[in-house]
Amino acid sequence: MDPRVSLALRRERRRSIPISELAAALKLSPRAVARVVEELGRIGFAIESHPLLGLRLAAAPDAILAEEIAYDQGRACHGVALASRVGRRVWCVGEAVSTNDLAWDAAAQGPAESDGLAIFAEHQSGGRGRRGNRWLAPAHSSILCSIVLWTADGPGQGAMLTRAAAVAAARAIEGRCDLAVGIKWPNDLVVEDRKVGGILVEARPALGEVSPLVIGIGLNCTQGPEDFPAEIRGAASLAMLGVEMDRTLLARGLLAELDRVIAGAADPEGMAKVRGEAAARCRTLGRMISLREGDTTWRGEVIDLDPDYGLVLRLPEGGIRRFPAMTTHVVAQ
């Protein structure tokens, strides 16, 4: 399929586009546009055609399509040229135990084959969250994605990528939705304190000068309240918050933003900007929380994030203590 037509119609879904206008914008002939429309119809797109008004996308396939996600990916985001690393290859599957598992299988082929690979699934039977929690969602209701990145081995890579991925996902949602997205430390995306997504970065022992990490991202898109188990009724989907959701456009934005953030964070100045944005979005700052490190529970006021993305707490007795992101979890706030 030629994804240019379907993506153009997705972006202008509220209006009909005259065929001559669409053809000129895509540098295609009107006849070529008509042929693409016929092909799109055969694979599940419903496109209305009016002799005067033109074409309008009435419905699209339920599944995310790799051709649409990968097309022209990374060329530019908000007018800024990107490194085109994240999403340089895209796989889409109907179902998986976990996209992170598929990503680790791909990483075994080495960096040349897997660096930047993004894998999307419509449904996961055993999706993982932080600290062994499960990520469950009905088919076609979420963005369930894992990205393989090979990095120079060094301390704090997992925490850095967690922060970068959270910032990128927040930007991507805001780029598609009129919502303010915050970060509930360390890896939840929230809108008005309701969880709409999460990040899970996994690392394995180094295999030399570089080693693979996998960034798992889950975003709640079209679920209704009945789709969330009782223990996570505080979660929400973007649709529940009033957003008319196109998962394909959000997925494209997610990869572009992640590519941009990671490329920008390669130097100290860029990393400082990511740290500053993560801190500005952090909904945990200024709150009294209880957290657990090892076998000990601590309570205090969150006063800062340290450079490695750990929490800095002011304890009731007045002392200041730092808690690493990788070995700490919040139990109440």
Image: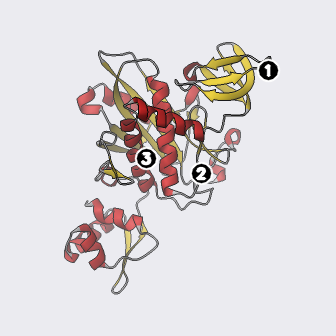
Among numbered discs 1 and 2, the one appearing first in the sequence: 2
Label 2 belongs to which residue? 180
Q: In which quarter of the image is the C terminus?
A: top right
| Mark identifier at residue 97 | none
| Mark identifier at residue 254 | 3
> Mark 3 or 1, which is nearer the eye?
1
* Occupied quadrant, residue 29: bottom left
Quick one: 273 or 182, which is closer to the camera? 273
Among numbered discs 2 and 3, the one appearing first in the sequence: 2
203 up-or-down from 265: above or below? above
Quick one: 44 or 52, which is closer to the camera? 52
Question: Could you tell me which residue is drawn at 47 percent across and 42 percent down?
Answer: 168
* Occupied quadrant, residue 210: top left
Among numbered discs 3 and 1, the one appearing first in the sequence: 3
Task: Say which amino acid is labelled 1.
Answer: Pro
Outermost top residue? 295
Q: Quadrant of the N terminus?
A: bottom left
Label 1 belongs to which residue? 316
Position in image of residue 271 (x %, y %): 44, 32
Question: Please, what secondary structure does the residue beneath circle 2 have?
Answer: loop
